[in-house]
């Protein structure tokens, strides 16, 4: 499984803002927006292009656009904070939605919404979720996608735990991971250490 850690200084700076417990919700959301741009930029680095000839005001030249824009799938709630920025970078992308809540005791994901196209054959999919912790929520989401025929899935995460990366690797699912950091470990409550806390609560306040 391909894992890309985006270690650009600007990505590290935005992630540090998100980690800092003094960062309020507005600043946390702003840093996640900016980090998302960098992660999606990296996720699309090798995306195939279609070429056409255009006229500039001066001469003829080649013009490029994505041959097969990905379906964007934010995982609610926390992934919503990545959706608009990813969509701005890829305006012709379509968007699906998956809503999951992780049980605090069992750490298992419970679905409360699935809104996805029926067929995803031959469509790249970018799953947007800031946190890859145990990997249970990401695995659940990717299985929803592969059941619909997806074979090319990218997990775009601000932060990952080694346990979550291994979980995805062991699952054998067709996924690659783009993240700004692989942290040290999970704690006994299933939170990433050092992490940034609960990415949903940090953005939207405690429910
Ligand atoms: O890898 P896992 O162990 O499954 O944990 C990661 C999940 O936990 C968080 O969501 P949460 O369930 O807290 O929901 P929220 O986005 O509504 O806060 C996060 O956004 C992931 O979806
Ligand atoms: O550290 C973690 C783990 C799961 N979900 C979060 O929001 N944060
Ligand atoms: Mg949460």
Image: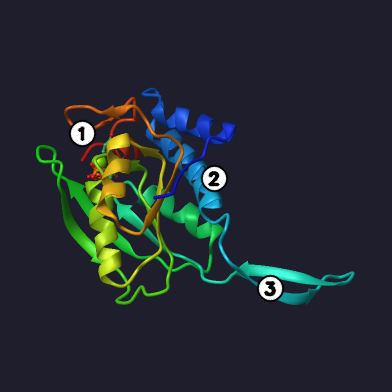
Q: Report crowding for label 3: few under 14, some 14 to 19, many 20 or more residues within 10 A (C-alpha).
A: few
Mark 1 and mark 3: Cα distance apart in space = 46 Å
Give the residue at the far left of this rendering.
105
Residue 113 shown left or right of residue 127 in the figure:
left
Q: Which mark is residue 33?
A: none
Looking at the image, residue 190 lies above or below residue 87:
above
Q: Which residue is mark 1?
A: 190
Q: Quadrant of the C terminus?
A: top left
- Pick whichever of labels 2 and 3 is earlier in the sequence: 2
Classify mark 1 as within 8 Å of ligand 1 or not, answering yes or no. Answer: yes
Mark 2 and mark 1: Cα distance apart in space = 27 Å
* Quadrant assignment for ligand 3: top left
Residue 106 shown left or right of residue 164 in the figure:
left
Q: How many marks?
A: 3
User: What is the x, y in percent for residue 101?
Assistant: 19, 48
Residue 47 shown left or right of residue 117 in the figure:
right
Q: Report crowding for label 2: few under 14, some 14 to 19, many 20 or more residues within 10 A (C-alpha).
A: some
Q: Which residue is mark 2?
A: 38
Q: Are marks 2 and 3 in contact (CB under 8 Å)?
A: no
Q: Is residue 200 visible?
A: no
Number of the front mark, 2 or 3: 3
- Pick whichever of labels 2 and 1 is earlier in the sequence: 2
The residue lying at 71 percent from left, 76 percent from top is: 52
Residue 174 shown left or right of residue 8 in the figure:
left
- Pick whichever of labels 1 and 3 is earlier in the sequence: 3
Element at badge 3?
strand
Q: Which mark is residue 51?
A: 3
Element at badge 1?
loop
**Foreground residue, 109 or 76?**
109
Q: Are marks 2 and 1 in contact (CB under 8 Å)?
A: no
Looking at the image, residue 75 lies above or below residue 92:
above
Mark 2 and mark 3: Cα distance apart in space = 24 Å
């Amino acid at each position: 499984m391909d894992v890309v850690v985006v270690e650009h200084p600007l990505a590290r700076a935005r992630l540090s803002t998100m980690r800092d417990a003094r960062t309020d919700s507005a600043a946390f959301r702003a840093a996640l927006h900016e980090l998302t741009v960098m992660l999606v930029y990296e996720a699309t680095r090798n995306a195939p292009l279609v070429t056409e000839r255009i006229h500039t005001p001066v001469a003829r030249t080649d013009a490029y656009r994505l041959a097969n824009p990905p379906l964007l799938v934010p995982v609610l709630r926390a992934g919503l904070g990545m959706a608009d920025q990813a969509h701005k970078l890829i305006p012709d992308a379509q968007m699906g939605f998956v809503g999951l809540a992780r049980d605090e005791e069992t750490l298992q994901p419970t679905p409360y919404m699935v809104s996805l196209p029926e067929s995803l054959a031959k469509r790249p999919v970018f799953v947007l979720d800031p946190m890859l912790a145990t990997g249970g929520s990401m695995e659940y989401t990717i299985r929803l996608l592969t059941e619909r025929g997806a074979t090319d899935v990218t997990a775009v995460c601000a932060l990952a735990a080694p346990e979550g990366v291994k979980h995805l690797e062991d699952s054998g699912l067709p996924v690659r991971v783009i993240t700004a950091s692989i942290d040290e470990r999970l704690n006994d409550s299933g939170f990433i250490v050092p992490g940034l806390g609960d990415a949903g609560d940090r953005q939207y306040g405690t429910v």
